[in-house]
Amino acid sequence: MTNCYIFNPDHDMALADNSYHYMPPVSIDKMAIDLALLPLWYSEVAGFVLAPSAYNMDFIFRNKHLFNWSLELMTLCGAGDINDINFLPWGWNKTLYHRLNAHGVNSTLLPDTEYIEKLRDFSHRKHAVSLLAELTHIDHCCGQSLWIDSIGSCKEFILNHNQTILKAPLSGSGKGLKWCDGEFSPSVENWCKRLLMHNDGIIVEPVYDKVLDFAMEFILDGDFKIQFLGYSLFKTSPHGAYEGNVLDSDDNIEKLLLEYVPASAFCKIRDELMRLLPGEFKGYSGHVGVDMMICQSGQVSDYKIHPCVEINLRMNMGIVAHQIYKNFVSAHSKGYFSIVRYTKGNDCIMWQAEMQGKHPLNLKDGKVETGFLALTPVTKHTQYCAFICIE
């Protein structure tokens, strides 16, 4: 069966909306269009990538001689013409199901409603709450996360902590968050009321003194089998939005982490997750990213691991970065992967030219040794561009 990869960054929002006809914000829709070719860089086997034609086809043609890509372009209109295709999206939801089915894809090639509902339940943050409780007993670990179902309990928790983060039950990493500084203000109260009106609870957590963001990446096969893929070392904004990933080997990332916490803690966390995740998400097949962080605990030299900040049951940028480093970056090099956004015409073109001038690309045997490389097409209409810059 032929694989077809789909980058649908609206997945988390569509899953939360739980509708066949969800309409993402214009910015997210534009991101999906501009970054449609991102699967070229993380696909494991030959097949197709679903994307508009024209400039995407030109990008593939111009760069195919440089890189060992395994994917060809397929348009949405042509998706229903192949009867033995295995769709591999960023994540499955009802909106994507309807979109493909409306363009002629046979429903037998798509997950059924029961599986999508199960995936929606698995993506609920209550699973991160329960898994965190199973991990905090490990030496050098910390973390508190509570499921609260009333305004009074929210208020009590916020007033008892200097800084608090509130989380919606369903939303992507960096989304559906509300930060509080020990004050139950009217805006916080209204935010909580709106969430409780449509959900049966809210997640509340104290804010920790974060030093580093990282993740452990896994893949499940739906039958209690799990594989550890490696680490992801990434950066977020002060309010949790994704900013980019370090491109480096797992060994080097682990060496950095071990400057803060002993190796035994990471081994125990990994082993416990490999024991717990297959049971927690029984029947799920796909990638699992468990976001974590190194925190400073009181004294300057006292560091701990928060072992379960978020759980992402989908493809994620950490795995994308991991695959890019493994397949397209020289083993002795390192750098970073990120996504930029420009809203004015030609700004992205000018930025790309500036980066190419500052960081000339140097390839050897189909891998980047140094320099800047745009991973997705840049035109006068581009607002989003994925890129790497290698030292």
Image (cartoon, rainbow, N blue to C red):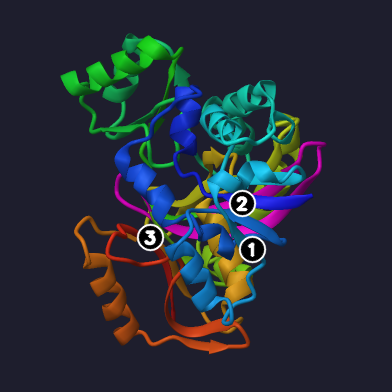
Q: Are marks 2 and 3 in contact (CB under 8 Å)?
A: no
- Amino acid type assigned to the residue bearing label 3 in the image: Ile
Q: Is residue 166 visible?
A: yes
Judged by depth in the image, the label closer to the viewer, 2 or 3, is: 2
> What is the crowding at mark 2: few (fewer than 14 residues within 10 Å), some, or many (at least 20)?
many
The answer to whether residue 230 is magenta is yes
Q: What residue do we see at 38% from left, 37% from top?
A: 175
Secondary structure predominantly adopted by residues drawn in magenta:
strand
The answer to whether residue 138 is magenta is no
Q: What residue do we see at 41% from left, 66% from top?
A: 377
Q: What residue do we see at 29% from left, 17% from top?
A: 155
Number of marks in the rendered image: 3
Disc ID at residue 339 = 3
Q: Earlier in the sequence, mark 3 or mark 1?
A: 1
Where disc 3 sits, the SS reads strand
Stretch in magenta = 215-242
Q: Position of residue 290 (x, y in %)?
A: 57, 45
- Amino acid type assigned to the residue bearing label 1 in the image: Leu
